[in-house]
Image (cartoon, coloured by chain):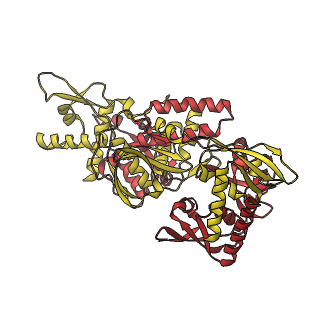
Amino acid sequence: MVDNAAIRALRTMDLIPYILENPGVSISSLATKFSVTQKQIENDLQLIFMCGLPGYTPYELIDIVFEDGIVSVIDPQVLDKPRRFNKSELIVIALGLQILIEINKSNPVQLEKLQSLSRKISKLGSSNSITFNPVETKSVFLGQITKAISERKHLNIEYNSLIKDKKTNRVVDPQRIYFLNGNLYLSAFDLEVRSDRVFKVDLIEDCKIVDFKDHVNISEPAKSFEVVLDVRKSHRSFIERNSSIISASKELGDRFEVHIQISNLEWLKRSILSNAPGISITSPSLLANELLESANTVLALYQA
Amino acid sequence: MSSQKTERLINLTLALLATKRYLTKSEIFKSVTGYSGTPETMERMFERDKDELRNMGVEIEVKGLDPLFEDDQGYLIRSETFQLSGNEFASDELLYLTMAANLWHDSALSNDSKAALLKIQSLSGPIEFNAFNSPVVRDNENSQMLATAFEAIEKCKKLSFKYNGNHRIVEPLGMFMRSGFWYLVAKDDKIVKSFKLVRIESRIAMDAGSFQKLEGFDLSSYLKRYSEEEIIQAEILVRKEQAYSLRSKYLVKEFDSEWDLMSIPYSYEPEMIEILLWHGQNIIVKNPQSLRNSIVSRLGEFING
């Protein structure tokens, strides 16, 4: 990264309140936090060591000690507090708070605190031209799930599998929670099938923490194979949503030829049928025929 | 060279931050280390330093000290515009701020998220917080595009990019995130439209000049109009012991020995069809007729290629 003097000056000043609140922090950890090299952090610290208030006697200089890769601040002068959040940092915080409010709707105490914090942040001047459209997420079990993750415990969940269209009961080792395309997901290791699985949080019907201490962590890579799809331009949201499984894609006039690597055929068949006629299978032909047959079966229900 | 200048910028900031009264240029040149040379040289150095700090968002206040002498101006930086204060946030609020910023840690906003987290940790110290058990957002956008769009909105700069095969120059007004995707709201040839960021086919550039902010534009009321659609109730037959994900959301009534009856509200037909066809032969639409027709024609087209 090319550093100009002003960028470097502000970063160097940002180091002081950070070290003040986190005394004994290592140079390597500062380098990671501030996204620069260790050498750069050392140079910045050498530099700020020479700075201070007019007069520049030892009492007016910023005083830090660094030894054996560990830093502490003795006198920060006026730099005892971090700089104010800038516009884009406020946006990130304000959007994050909107999500936290959304997923804590069932917890009135937290909800109230979050809402008052959110008002405080918007008064600080977070832009009102950027908003997050809340997701409809039922997440009564979110608290339990995060608790299980942090305490490294297993969860017994009753899950409405969209793909199998069945209620299933599983014991999983929860790993992390994330939002993707507006939905909240739990990624976990399923102890029964001994493989990583992803669960939509709003399809979890019941959830209990089970007290298993031992941690299983062997993931067995599921077998995947290539399927070639023909996707109409009107259905390109399918490509946007599933970019992680796409290995190649080519634009051919008003459609795309998309190669995907897939292990879950049931999911693929349901996705294609639900997008009919926007997506079809080019190869393998066996799979293509199987889908045509399912489409005929559904159509027959309407013609009966 | 560059180290000297950095040092001077730091010393200037500290001096302006520490002073209780406005400092004149001559006081600055006398007392702040790093200013040397002829008066003209120092003058030029100071003007440049001041501009550079201002460009980085540092608010330097100016005040005329003597109405008769325009030259005699004083400068200072107010602590409250530069720094957060120690009692601005309670400790549980700092934890929520950490969680809120951390949500974007895996996303296109990760740079701003990281910078915000640094500041929060400079207030709170190491917080009792396990980043792995709090949710994160994963999105599909690239951060450069988002950052450019944010900046253009704040600074009222026009944006140019290619969308749906056409080159556009638009006046950006706002952004919103829906279903995990970012949208840019912008005036394109007198009409306010939404552009899905992942569909932008080119680099997005701020190279077409500035514009006057649209008077009276309000993003939340725009979005409200955008999403006010008519709600239709669909009557659906659901095969017994099937379609559990729908059964958990909507009530069913017994229809006959093979089927149950369910009513599902919807506003956007393509989305509804997607949900229904996901369940294949376990669902039949009874009403409205238009939804039935659309499903039949879609399947027909799928089968006949």
Kindly tell me whether residue B155 is visible in this rendering. Answer: yes
Q: Nearer the viewer, residue B52 or B291?
A: B291
Q: Check the image and report above or below for B165 versus B101.
A: below
**Residue A17 horizontal/vertical position (percent):** 45, 39
**Residue B200 horizontal/vertical position (percent):** 43, 57
Q: Quadrant of the C terminus of chain A?
A: bottom right
Look at 51% across and 68% down and name the residue there: A255
B157 sits left or right of A213 in the view: left
**Residue A67 horizontal/vertical position (percent):** 47, 50
- Quarter-wise, where is residue B39 in the image? top left
Q: Which chain is red?
A: A
Q: Quadrant of the N terminus of chain A?
A: bottom left
A66 sits left or right of A53 in the view: right
Q: Chain B, which colour?
A: yellow
Numbered disc total? 0
Q: Nearer the viewer, residue A157 or B11?
A: A157
Q: Nearer the viewer, residue B181 or A15?
A: B181
Q: Check the image and report above or below for B164 versus A15.
A: below
Q: Residue furthest right?
A: B257
**Residue A153 horizontal/vertical position (percent):** 76, 50
Q: Nearer the viewer, residue B93 or B136?
A: B136
- Quarter-wise, where is residue B40 in the image? top left
A30 sits left or right of B131 in the view: left
Kindly tell me whether residue B248 is visible in this rendering. Answer: no
